[in-house]
């Protein structure tokens, strides 16, 4: 019975992404890109300049500092999903999945900009000098049906308990250090609740320390491996492009894939890694003290760039260029195996690495989930959410990590469908004129 239910969920996941989310994402991303005259490309140098300028700026007013909101949000993006989940795209869909990760990132930039913009525009005061926002607020303007924002809020509560990354971290630590995984799970849950109680500001401080270290360290190792294999890069990129439009034949332990599987795997893992249009980014960024929706939303474009074009691309290229992508091993071990060819001690480094990264993701998601739970029930929402989180995380520790990923993927697909239509309904209210650096001072 359990196996039948798991197979049913996997079939539902494949159907949603292959026949509903994939075309909707491409059409909506393409439409908004055209409407904005491809602002994510046209204004990208300006966005990068404004980002570094904002590192020195001190915006006035109440609420979370814009950069702390940025680092909290990107802390939710950069983690196990960038190192492990995207590698499942190559493992299941072949090398061509990387091309669809790039296409999704281009569409995701403008979609994430739009959801953050709307979140800030329709946010409300929390009565304590801060703000609350997210899809449950702006979808009230998009849908006549009052139950839809509540359903989206409930789905965000489910999405806020990061069962997949939690399972990967617990399994990785238990396997590499020979610890009891249930004891590891209990310790992580205790830390998660303790840190999340201090809010987005505190999570932002933690993420702003770990994320830059992660980017520099991981990219340095990745660049070294790619440099050592530089002569192979042209043929690898050619395989990526060719496989994206033809699928990929069976190689070694790889079972082969068709075009639809390749595209859907690349797109669903890219959406998951970048939190594209699921509403999480809108909830976090809405707490900013920044009053300009355009300025804060432009940071979402930077998030996708760093997440997909830098980190995810590095991860997939590592497993492709070292040839481990089709090895008959768990996806969680692919990058570790690729780096272990060139660097010693990866069996110690990678578990600790994933712990630090994944934990910032888990607590960032959890903070957004708490906001949604409090929206549904201001009195008991937080306490009920703690109970739900503990039960879910401990329950999925007993299962395979792929099953947890399937649940997260289905939840993300449903959130995307609701949010994409809501963004489409409110498309005329989005301002794509990103202010110049001079106007951001």
Image (cartoon, rainbow, N blue to C red):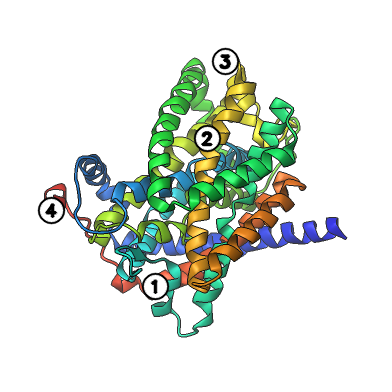
Residue position marked by numbered label 2 in the rendering: 356
Q: Kindly report the distance in space between the C-alpha atoms of the residues bearing marks 3 and 2.
A: 22 Å
Q: Kindly report the distance in space between the C-alpha atoms of the residues bearing marks 3 and 1.
A: 49 Å
Q: Which of marks 3 and 2 is in front?
A: 2
Of mark 3 and mark 1, the one earlier in the sequence is 1
Q: Which mark is residue 246?
A: none
Q: Which mark is residue 342?
A: 3
Residue position marked by numbered label 1 in the rendering: 138
Of mark 1 and mark 4, the one earlier in the sequence is 1
Tell me: residue 347, above or below residue 279: above
Element type at mark 2: helix
Give residue 326's position: percent from left, percent from top: 69, 32
Residue position marked by numbered label 4 in the rendering: 439
For the question of whether residue 217 can be seen, the reply is yes
Tell me: residue 123, above or below residue 220: below
Element type at mark 4: helix
Q: Nearer the viewer, mark 3 or mark 1?
A: 1
Give residue 402's position: percent from left, percent from top: 71, 47
Q: Kindly report the distance in space between the C-alpha atoms of the residues bearing marks 2 and 1.
A: 33 Å
For this view, does 262 lie left or right of residue 434?
Answer: right
């Amino acid at each position: 019975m359990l196996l039948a239910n798991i197979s049913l969920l996997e079939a539902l996941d494949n159907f949603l992404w292959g026949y509903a989310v994939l075309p909707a994402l491409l059409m909506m991303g393409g439409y908004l890109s055209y409407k904005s005259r491809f602002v994510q490309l046209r204004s990208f140098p300006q966005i990068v300049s404004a980002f570094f300028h904002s590192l020195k700026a001190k915006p006035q007013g109440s609420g979370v500092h814009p950069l702390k909101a940025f680092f909290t949000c990107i802390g939710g993006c950069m983690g196990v999903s960038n190192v492990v989940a995207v590698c499942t795209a190559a493992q299941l869909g072949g090398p061509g999945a990387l091309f669809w990760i790039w296409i999704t990132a281009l569409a995701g930039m403008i979609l994430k900009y739009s959801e953050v913009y709307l979140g800030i525009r329709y946010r409300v005061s929390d009565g304590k000098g801060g703000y609350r926002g997210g899809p449950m607020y702006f979808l009230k303007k998009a849908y006549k049906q009052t139950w839809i924002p509540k359903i989206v809020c409930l789905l965000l509560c489910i999405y806020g308990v990061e069962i997949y990354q939690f399972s990967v971290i617990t399994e990785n630590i238990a396997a590499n250090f020979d610890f009891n995984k249930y004891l590891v799970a209990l310790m992580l849950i205790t830390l998660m609740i303790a840190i999340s109680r201090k809010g987005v500001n505190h999570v932002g401080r933690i993420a702003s320390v770990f994320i830059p270290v992660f980017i520099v360290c991981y990219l340095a190792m990745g660049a070294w491996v790619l440099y050592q294999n530089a002569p192979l890069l042209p043929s690898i990129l050619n395989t990526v492009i060719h496989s994206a439009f033809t699928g990929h034949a069976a190689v070694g332990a790889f079972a082969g894939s068709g075009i639809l599987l390749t595209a859907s795997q690349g797109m669903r893992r890219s959406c998951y890694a970048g939190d594209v249009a699921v509403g999480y980014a809108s909830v976090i960024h809405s707490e900013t003290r920044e009053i300009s929706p355009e300025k804060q939303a432009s940071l979402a474009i930077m998030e996708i760039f760093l997440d997909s074009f830098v980190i995810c691309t590095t991860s997939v290229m590592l497993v492709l260029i070292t040839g481990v992508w089709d090895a008959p091993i768990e996806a969680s071990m692919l990058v570790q195996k690729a780096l272990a060819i060139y660097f010693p001690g990866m069996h110690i480094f990678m578990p600790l690495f994933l712990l630090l990264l994944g934990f910032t993701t888990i607590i960032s998601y959890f903070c957004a989930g708490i906001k949604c739970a409090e929206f549904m029930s201001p009195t008991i929402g937080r306490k009920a959410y703690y109970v739900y989180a503990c039960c879910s995380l401990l329950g999925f520790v007993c299962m395979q990590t792929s099953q947890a990923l399937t649940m997260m993927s289905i939840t993300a697909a449903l959130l995307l469908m609701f949010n994409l239509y809501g963004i489409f309904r409110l498309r005329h209210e989005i301002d794509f004129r990103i202010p110049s650096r001079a106007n951001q001072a």
